[in-house]
Amino acid sequence: MNDLKDFLRQFPKLPKEVVTYLSDLDEKELSQRPFKKLYKGFLPFLFEMNVWGGWITPDANWYLPTLSSDTDLPLKRRLKNPARYQHNARLQGFREGFVRLDWKQPVFDTHFSVKKTQTKKLIFTFDPQTLKNRKVFNAVQHIATFYTIAGAPPLLFEIVLVSYDGDKLLYRKKKFNQLSFFVLELTTIRYKL
């Protein structure tokens, strides 16, 4: 219970439905959450749970939350010289080392689903070269840990690796049903580079 109190104190902007859900968990369920593996210092500045997702900057210092259905808007504001990439924000973003974070739940809602009957998915999309930066690697890993603590199971993790065919983006997906397998795959990708 102390771990939960510390978590709620460290993250006062958690959505109300998530706070209610966590507060209703019993000791056994709370003991299965990886509170001890989460280090707030590895999370990018301004990180918060957001049903629209967001972008992690190439230096992993900032989280740019998406606040509308235009998921690329926060990214577009950060990019310089977009004409070089034919104004394709995603292409430029991934080439420059940004990481996209998406949250998918069965029915889109501005509130997080905490129903145990609905499968939720946390998706990270990035160029594999991005993981060379240790701060980005740590940020992705700790955001996944954060969602494991705050989210209602079942929760799936997905890594979408970006490659390029000229100006065309190609995606390769891998899904995981446990945080440990997700982190193992991140580590494998990082050390294959």
Image: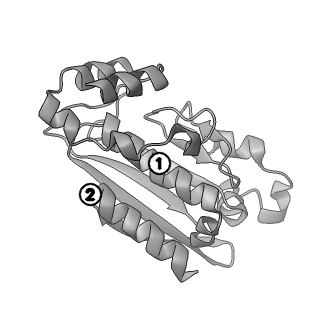
Q: Decide which of 12, 105 is in the foreground and name it.
A: 12
Residue at the spot of label 2: 178
Which label was assigned to residue 65? Answer: none
Image coordinates of residue 69 in percent, x first then y, are 52, 36
User: What kind of element bears circle 2?
Assistant: loop
Q: Is residue 35 left or right of residue 131?
A: left
Which label was assigned to residue 142? Answer: 1
Q: What amino acid is found at the position of numbered circle 1 in the picture?
A: His
Separation of marks 1 and 2 at Cα, in angstroms: 14 Å
Task: Kindly indicate whether the residue at mark 2 contacts the one at mark 1 (C-beta within 8 angstroms).
Answer: no
Give the quadrant of the C terminus.
bottom right
Q: Is residue 109 above or below residue 158?
A: above
Total numbered circles:
2
Residue 104 visible in this rendered orientation of the protein = no
Q: Residue at x 51, y 59 (%)?
A: 125
Quarter of the figure with residue 157: bottom left
Image coordinates of residue 153 in percent, x first then y, are 21, 42
Q: Is residue 122 left or right of residue 98?
A: left
Q: Residue at x 40, y 70 (%)?
A: 185
Q: What amino acid is found at the position of numbered circle 2 in the picture?
A: Gln
Image coordinates of residue 118 in percent, x first then y, are 19, 41
Q: Residue at x 62, y 55 (%)?
A: 135
User: What kind of element bears circle 1?
Assistant: helix
Q: Decide which of 108, 97 is in the foreground and name it.
A: 97
Dot placed on the residue nearer the N-terminal end, 1 or 2? 1
Q: Residue at x 33, y 30 (%)?
A: 3
Image coordinates of residue 119 in percent, x first then y, are 22, 46
Neighbor class of circle 2 (other Cα within 10 Å; few <14, some 14-19, many 20+) is few
Q: Is residue 49 above or below residue 23?
A: below
Neighbor class of circle 1 (other Cα within 10 Å; few <14, some 14-19, many 20+) is many
Residue 130 visible in this rendered orientation of the protein = yes
Give the quadrant of the N terminus.
top left
